[in-house]
Amino acid sequence: MLPVATVVAQGASRLDTARRPDAGRVVDTARRDSLPEVTVRGYRDGGSVSGAIRLQKASGLIVDIIPEESIQRSTDLSIADVTRRINGLSVTTDNSGQASHTIIRGMDPKYNYTLIDGIKMPSPGDRSRYIPLSIFPADMVQRVEVYKSLTPAMEGDAIGGVVNMVLRNAPESPLLKVRFSGGYNQTFFDRSYLGFDQTVVSHKSPYELHGPGYYATGGDFSKANLSFNSRRPLPDALGSVVWGRRFFGGRLGVLVAGEYQNIKRGSSNIFIPQNNEPGLNNTPGLTDLYRSNYSATLIREGLHGKIDHVFNPRNSVGLYTFYVSQQDIETRSRVDTSLSLGRTVPGTGRITVSDRSREHLQHIYGTSLRGEHELGPAFSFRWVGSWAVAKGLYPDWSELSAGTARLEGPGGVITQTPLLLGGMSRSWLSNRERDWSVYGDWDYHRVVSGHRLSVAFGGMYRDKRRDNFYNSYDFQPAVTTNQGQPFTDVYHAEWTNGDGPLNPLGSVANPNTYVAHEYIGAGYVSASWKGRRAEWLAGLRYEDTRQSFVSSVDPTVTYGKEGSIHYHDYLPSASLKYRLGDSRGSRDSRGSRDSRVDSRQLLRASWYRSISRPALYDVTFYSIGYEDYREAGNPFLRRSHADNFDLRYEWYPGGLDLLQGGVFYKHITDPYERTLLNANDELYPLPSQGLSYTQAGELTAQMRNAGPANDYGVEVGLSHYFGRLGVQANYTYTYSRIVQQAKFKTRQDVNDPSSEIVTVSRSESRPLQGQSPHLASLGLLYQQSGWSGRVSAIYTGRRIYSVSGWYGLEYWQRGYTVLDASVEKSIGRRVKVFAKASNLFSVNTTVDLLRGDRIMVMKQVDRAVYYVGGQWDLGK
């Protein structure tokens, strides 16, 4: 059960503001409708399905909610997994098959933001502004709310939507709940896990340990993290504990919860990058084929606590704190076969073998102090002070390569050359982001002619600082034979420069080592009017943004030392909630007529203007090689603006049944997307090496602004129970269109095959990156005599996997379906046991290049996962 501090009943739900100080509280809005001046205090279970339906119905916004009850019955391990089940949402996956980021209504994660109990937090991600939802264990939350419309009280940088994770509150009755499970990935029934000793990894580079001017030697670098072993991994282990209760007659509430996950994942894939300029008529430049095996261990930890105190019916405060972390330990073994160098017939060509050990650590700490005060019968004030720090670290990211070749000799005989040692790189990348934030909201309300009028105003201020550090060391193999150095293992490898790195001082003086600041100030004013049928809300928000950075590069040698950006935005919005039900009323037990409107049918309409603000990382001159391409920042990137329209019908016939359908439209100015640049393409409009611009120099991915885009669609959702059998279904159709200038290689005279080949610009129309036209889910639920079972299927349609700067050379990911199943049995009142299986179809992530015939350029196989576990509820 969830405590509700004393609050003056208002016309709209507390869900009207996604960053409300009382996130997680549920107020009896049915009583508000008939008793607008009455103060109510009570308890609701905000983690139940019925509680989620009540919240969604009461909200003045367009919102979808997944409660704790549904999450625990699913096979989801992280909040990113949970969001797949919400209408209009899909996810991206990483190399190990784990859901990583959420796409809302076809809008890439950069167009959305994430809240924890209604508060923005800094991101530990090295390349993203907002929190990666994969870092949060699914058991950590009481519910997940996805807002698809905004009010003036909400921060305006959300074109797609907002994900709010509501953590548990102190219960009405003492609570102690213990939950654990174990499982195994099908991948490791078929092959072994390739691992390394991560305990030897140094979290600081020689530069950091010994200071500037230190000459690193070979002895400063461990070799054990590049010595790999094959084994059968231990089973996955997951567990959570929740304890809470209220003291002093319910005035003081305390809750503490902890979560732990140790998960092993593996995948195999092939990938053919476009790592060369295309030929005539944009014939793809495909010169290499990668075959990679990934083995990864993910360790997630979460801890959060809440203390709230109700001083009297008009004043309450709360202290919330949390910590989450994710340790991603990954091994990659890759074979790169050249499709051009030394290749005369199939099975021949140059081959590069590379092994990589990489550990990625992410942590977030956050604390907020909140208060809510009724200053009179018509005036209230809410405030929040928040401090948070997010850290990310890649310690000693190590890659070791070796090369060989299969060559065709006389008579067609194919021979293989000796395996020779290649280069080695050791890199350290860390980032720390700190936020100080304050919020204040004032609300004046009164009854006018039987209607409720509310005027609200407030603002916020955030001071963000980001410290980024990057250092790398490169090793060159010593020549020990006339062919090179035969490779056996890392322990027998010999390197030039006294067996040390070529750059013993490191490479700290680079644009990836920088300090950046962001200051955001905002204010808003809004007015709402609530009648028996209609609720109106309209207002204006103002946001002022200042960003700046200073990097460690030497300005006399290269560009990218410093930069600053300043802009402001006016963001109006308006929304309507209208009850369509019968208003004639009914007689109560005393024969009096109840004049309340039947609110089972609702019509919602919304319009708001919003922006998408590039991250501090995006607007620096950073340049780092990640997976398959180099990635570069873009200080010339402009923020996006959008006008967003929504219309939705909702019907709540009773119980857990629900029917909803709606349409949405977004017009986006200056959208920005990840675009692939070839070596000769313009990276920056800065003169360099005699040219009027700076060339990319190699295949590079960069965020680029494009022409105006439109995004619109239809969402339909259904939940209905036939006795013990329940059906849940969602479908979203989304259409988006963006126009961008792309490069095309053609003859100077298309009618003269001997004329010079030139590169021209063509206008290309395509969908937004990551947008699928069709998203659908279907779930079947069954309950009887303590048993419950669930089978669900989630379909994600075809979408653009990566955008190319060349006309018609985008990579397209095929549609796929994920099938999950779970069963649960209650043993008495306190014990449950369950079994779960996810990804029963063993999803293949398949990516194509559509150039006349379909060319498959990527295929990754992710296998099924099985879990069994139990839960003990030891509360009253």
Image: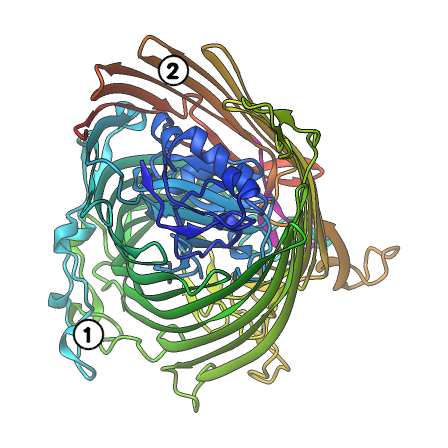
* Amino acid at the residue labelled 2: Gly
Residue stretch in magenta: 800-815
Q: Residue at x 52, y 42 (%)?
A: 344
Q: Is residue 480 magenta?
A: no
Q: Is residue 802 magenta?
A: yes
- The disc at residue 208 is 1
Q: Residue 153 location in percent, x, y?
A: 53, 61
Number of numbered discs: 2
* Amino acid at the residue labelled 1: Glu
- The disc at residue 789 is 2
Q: Residue 796 location in percent, x, y?
A: 56, 33
Q: Measure the C-alpha gap from mark 2 to mark 1.
A: 54 Å
Q: 184 or 749: nearer the eye?
A: 184
User: 730 left or right of 862?
Assistant: right
Q: Residue at x 39, y 46 (%)?
A: 25
SS of the residue under disc 1 = helix
Mark sitting earlier along the chain (2/1):
1
